[in-house]
Amino acid sequence: MAWALSDPSRSCAVLIGTHEYTELDDLPSVARNVSRLRELCCDPAVWGLADERCRVLRQASRGAILKAVEDATVEATDTVVVYYAGHGLVDPRSGELHLALPCSQAGPSYTALRYEELRSVLLHPSGGRPTAPRTVVILDCCWSGLALDGLMQAPDVAPAVAVEGACVLTATAGTRQALAPPGEKYTAFTGELIRLVEDGVPGRPALLSMAALFTELTAALTAKSRPLPQLSTRQTAGEICLFRNRARETVARPVPGKAPSRVPVGPTAGGTVPSGGGMASPGRVRVPFGEPEPDLPQLVPVALTETRSVWLGRYPVTQAQFGAFLRDPANARWHPAAARAAGTDVDDNYLAGWSGPDFPAGRAEHPVVAVSFPAARAYLAWAGRRLGVPLRLPTAAEWELAARAGRSGEWWRAEITAGRVNFLGSHAALTPVGEFPLNPYNIGDLLGNVWDICVDDRGAPVLRGGAYDTPAARLREQLSPRSPVECRGNVGFRCAGDR
């Protein structure tokens, strides 16, 4: 159930730590990671797992790890949590992630546990299907972002079974090493996770979702200039709640009829809060780290360099979100009939099928299409004022960086292989956002479903990413609309903003 604590009486956790090695450098902080996480998982004030439902494996063998994970997957009927901390290794031939064991060596991959084996056990315990509808995997090791390529799905399992409730949180991107800073009690990533669970987060609800934890982890690690975590989820997996919020501060709400004072605001759940926040108008007050309003986009951070990052919409703007924009009386000029009659900012195809501010029935979560460059910018200005974060269209370079997600070479082929792309060779019809898995940067539909309106170096509109009716060979094309007011049924847009 979304926004409910995973039932500790029906959940299981396996905490794996390898801190001493015969061939690799020791990681003494890993042992402290596992010990403290077990204490927190079993603390009734935090989660409340019974001792027998929280299995700790230190210096374990490949067989012992897989057996413990399989046992947890068979026993749990609510949520399975698997945590690993230690060295991460990359197979030099396949590029796959391996989890180091006590006797692992840096070269031969057969000395370590292949992550794919762990994933396979979670998907197919004893050759069957898992009994728990939700799975959380947390990896604190170098190159851990490589685990996001496969998320938690398998080609021979029905999609609803394979990915429903699957959440993978990693300490780094697939191209980055994790940190175990000398002199610190815990590793960099797990240390921040422990701090958040121990202290709670003021302004958050009583339960901390995985999306909220990712948000806070990203902000904390960014502030310390440390490698940024990654999160991949599907469906409502970002709403899985493993921990109570020990800060337990009530989210403030405006008093009807009274204009409260201005407060800093943040973007929606699943992204992170801009450093320095923003200012909300008195009529639309939001609280720091507040939960999202359903009619506003979700934002996630994307690092451009080691010192600069931007916000990007997790998904393209939906019909429901654009409908909320049209229902604001201040935006009446953007109603289909009015905008078409004006003839300056849209063409006759603008919002085809809409009736005033009402989108076609049953398509609330579909990306809004047939919007022009001026209409998209008008929406972003409106939504940015409500979020307190000035929004704009992404640049083509920002789009490329987010879509590449730290990968080199023909990265788009990996997107197609992983089933993340709605194109002419897959579903071949417009689908709601969230129907296809997120990429390693936790962003969806960058390739396929709808073309994204971006801007080039001159600020002119340019289309990136292809759509549901685009052949695979053309997904990487960079198109320009015939004019800024052109409205096409396979073109949408997403938000961007400076942090």
Image (cartoon, rainbow, N blue to C red):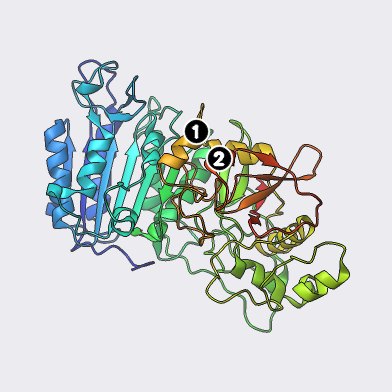
Task: Please tell me whether mark 2 or mark 1 is closer to you in this view.
Answer: 1
* Image quadrant occupied by the N terminus: bottom left
Locate residue 100 relative to residue 475 in the image: left or right: left
Quarter of the image where one finds residue 380: bottom right
Quarter of the image where one finds residue 345: bottom right
Estimate the spatial distance between the alpha carbons at disc 2 and disc 1, rounded to whole Å. Answer: 9 Å
Locate residue 152 relative to residue 59 in the image: left or right: right
Residue in view at x 66 percent, y 73 percent:
353
Residue 122 point in image, percent of width and height: 23, 47
Asked if residue 329 shows in the view, the reply is yes
Residue 54 point in image, percent of width and height: 18, 50
* Location of residue 253 with respect to 486 vertically, above or below: below
Residue 117 point in image, percent of width and height: 22, 37
Of 361 and 41, nearer the camera is 361
Question: Which residue lies under the disc numbered 2?
Answer: 403
Question: Which residue lies under the disc numbered 1?
Answer: 411
Residue in view at x 22 percent, y 50 percent:
13
Look at the numbered discs 2 and 1 and tell me whether their residues touch, using CB distance below 8 Å. Answer: yes
Dot 2 or dot 1: first in sequence order is 2
Of 336 and 381, nearer the camera is 336
Residue 142 point in image, percent of width and height: 38, 29
* Location of residue 356 with respect to 449 vertically, above or below: below
Q: Residues within 10 Å of mark 2 (few under 14, many from 20)?
A: many
Q: Residues within 10 Å of mark 1 (few under 14, many from 20)?
A: few
Amino acid type of the residue that numbered disc 2 sits on in the rendered structure: Ala
Of 306 and 168, nearer the camera is 168
Residue in view at x 20 percent, y 44 percent:
121
Secondary structure of the residue carrying tag 2 is helix
Amino acid type of the residue that numbered disc 1 sits on in the rendered structure: Trp
The disc placed on residue 147 is none
Secondary structure of the residue carrying tag 1 is helix
* Location of residue 154 with respect to 241 vertically, above or below: above
